[in-house]
């Protein structure tokens, strides 16, 4: 018998290693390279794109308006790129991010097909050792983890996966090859934002669709007009103002809450505003309406009644409507998706809804899915079961800071970050879309990710100008930020609702609101205040 051993490889030395080549990782490379740093991006996929590389499932589409879901750092890029519609699909988003990578020669600094296994900090040298699954070793002063907040997919632990004679696919690992649904009996588990997009797309294409739903979802009908040259010219004339505005609104969009709260508005005007927001066909219905939706239970119930009525009138069968219309939680306290004929899909004769809160899934069999009541024969089973949000991607890497402390084990005891940008005890380590920043869940993603990358880049530049080898938030700074985060979080109804916002979808995960709820504008100002103070609360040595 022949034995082989993995021979240790010599470390490759860089000033900064960036993990992930999605929206933030690409921009992090651009900004750090501007400083003259030697930067390498390590990316598990075969190309750039992050979420738009991995999530290529049927119906995948952005639900932020294209004209704010983009990079702002280059006027030339803004002038040359044209969006085909208000809410582009996955293929357009992937094409855009590949265009950015080529336009700014980013690929030369990106190593693809490279999954990071471990990152260890050495206190004597003040540097990180990054190890990949293939045994490559990288030595770096700075480690920037741009691994995404919703990039670690969850696969349900139903027994019998290996017995199923058909195909099982998780939406976050969809094959690049086109899947033909014609003639297939398809099952899908999950009715969150992703599940909704898949269901409304696959329902009309397959022989039969069985939807296994645990929690019904509020969703807003998407209005998605096409854009022509005139539309793009109008947007380009507004880009200067939009670039400033998105950083000041509550959720990083070009719209914001109404000037008056629900209670300050008379009933007739309330109704008119809700109808207008509903007709707009965007997330403005959620985060461009009344701010007291998130803090006042009675107000939330009134708005929830409005949305329930809108949903119910689109479903023919009252019994199906009873299952699809949420009643156990309020509108806006969980992620609100946009949809296109989603509810009408359940009016089709070939679509069946199974409520697994009442009819639990017991096992996957050779022929399909068995519940507590019956077996559903399937040819293809799709899991749209979400992610270990906020912490999952980082916890999948063995990150060890000072005194060999494991980040994964520390976060099991209690999630901690400083502004979602770094963690005490892990010098020279920076994060984007990590817990306790708006980017973790409650922000138009490119708005917050660009702001975080700019702050991190400026912090690194400042520390280098001071001759510092290490930069790290103090324990006191982190304690103060967590206390502030919790104070704001506990003012909202979101903490009272089970959802991935609270980590409730992951068994054993400490329940914490992942996203900072003080608003994008307020968060940005606090980050700017730290920067203006010479990074008070951050130790540089």
Image: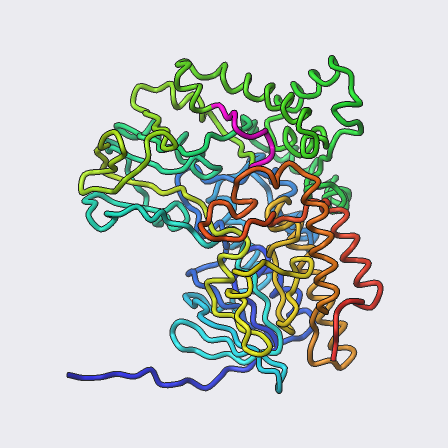
Q: Indicate the position of residue 462 as horizontal and vertical percent values.
A: 76, 72
Q: Which residues are magenta?
A: 325-334
Q: Nearer the viewer, residue 312 or 160?
A: 160
Q: As rendered, which of 410 and 293 lies closer to the eye?
A: 410
Query: Seen in the image, is 57 located left or right of residue 26?
Result: left
Residue occupying the far left of the picture: 1
Res. 317 image quadrant: top left
- Left or right relative to 378: residue 98: right
Q: Position of residue 468 (x, y in %)?
A: 73, 80
Position of 101 compared to 56: left or right? right
Q: Is residue 278 above or below residue 530?
A: above
Q: Is residue 539 above or below residue 148?
A: below
Snapshot colouring: rainbow
Quadrant (top left, top right, bottom left, bottom right) of the C terminus: bottom right
Viewer-nearest residue: 410 or 205: 410
Magenta segment, prevailing SS (helix, strand or loop) = loop
Query: Which residue is at 76% across, 44% downward?
Result: 248
Q: Residue 514, image x and y in percent? A: 60, 50
Which image quadrant for residue 257?
Answer: top right
Q: How many marks?
A: 0
From the viewer's perspective, is 485 left or right of 134?
right
Q: Taking 194 as reference, is 540 above or below it?
A: below
Give the percent coordinates (x, y) of residue 235. Answer: 69, 38
Whether residue 328 is in magenta: the answer is yes
Image quadrant where one finds the N terminus: bottom left
Residue 5 within the segment the image draws in magenta: no
């Amino acid at each position: 018998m022949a034995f082989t051993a993995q021979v240790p490889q010599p470390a490759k030395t860089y000033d900064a290693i960036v993990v992930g080549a999605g929206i933030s990782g690409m921009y992090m490379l651009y900004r750090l390279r501007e400083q003259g740093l030697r930067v390498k991006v390590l990316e598990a996929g075969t190309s750039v794109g992050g979420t738009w590389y991995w999530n290529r499932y049927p119906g995948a589409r952005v639900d932020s308006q294209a004209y704010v879901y983009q990079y702002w750092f280059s006027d030339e890029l803004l002038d040359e790129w044209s969006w085909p519609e208000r809410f582009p699909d996955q293929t357009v988003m992937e094409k855009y991010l590949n265009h950015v990578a080529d336009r700014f020669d980013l690929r030369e600094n990106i190593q693809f097909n490279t999954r990071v296994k471990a990152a260890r900090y050495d206190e004597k040298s003040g540097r990180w050792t990054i190890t990949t699954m293939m045994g490559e070793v990288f030595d770096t002063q700075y480690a920037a983890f741009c691994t995404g907040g919703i990039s670690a997919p969850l696969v349900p632990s139903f027994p019998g996966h290996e017995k199923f004679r058909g195909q099982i696919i998780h939406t976050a690992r969809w094959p690049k090859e086109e899947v033909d649904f014609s003639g297939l009996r398809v099952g899908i588990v999950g009715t969150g934002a992703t599940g909704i997009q898949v269901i409304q797309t696959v329902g009309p294409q397959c022989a039969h669709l069985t939807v296994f739903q645990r929690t019904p979802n509020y969703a807003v009908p998407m209005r998605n007009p096409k854009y022509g040259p005139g539309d793009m010219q109008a947007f380009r004339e507004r880009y200067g103002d939009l670039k400033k505005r998105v950083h000041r609104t509550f959720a990083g969009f070009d719209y914001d809450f109404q000037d008056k709260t629900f209670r300050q508005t008379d009933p007739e005007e309330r109704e008119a505003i809700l109808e207008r927001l509903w007709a707009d066909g965007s997330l403005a219905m959620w985060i461009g309406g009344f701010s007291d939706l998130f803090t006042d239970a009675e107000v939330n119930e009134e708005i929830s009644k409005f949305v329930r009525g809108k949903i119910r009138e689109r479903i023919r069968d009252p019994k199906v409507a009873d299952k699809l219309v949420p009643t156990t939680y309020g509108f806006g306290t969980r992620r609100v998706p946009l949809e296109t004929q989603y509810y009408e899909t359940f009016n089709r004769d070939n679509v069946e809804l199974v409520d697994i809160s009442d009819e639990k899934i017991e096992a996957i069999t050779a022929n399909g899915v068995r519940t507590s009541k019956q077996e559903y024969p399937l040819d293809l089973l799709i899991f749209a079961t979400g992610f270990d949000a906020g912490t999952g991607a980082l916890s999948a890497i063995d990150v060890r800071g000072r005194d060999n402390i494991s980040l994964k084990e520390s976060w099991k005891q209690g999630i901690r970050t400083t502004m979602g940008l770094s963690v005490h005890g892990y010098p020279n380590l920076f994060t984007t879309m990590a817990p306790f920043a708006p980017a973790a869940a409650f922000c138009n993603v490119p708005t917050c990710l660009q702001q975080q990358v700019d702050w991190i880049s400026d912090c690194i530049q400042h520390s280098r100008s001071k001759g510092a080898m290490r930069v790290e938030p103090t324990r006191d700074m982190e304690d103060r930020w967590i206390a502030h985060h919790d104070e704001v979080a506990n003012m909202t109804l979101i903490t009272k609702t089970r959802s991935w916002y609270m980590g409730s979808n992951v068994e054993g995960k400490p329940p914490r609101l992942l996203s900072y709820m003080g608003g994008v504008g307020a968060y940005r100002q606090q980050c700017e205040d730290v920067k203006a103070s010479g990074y008070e609360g951050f130790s540089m040595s």
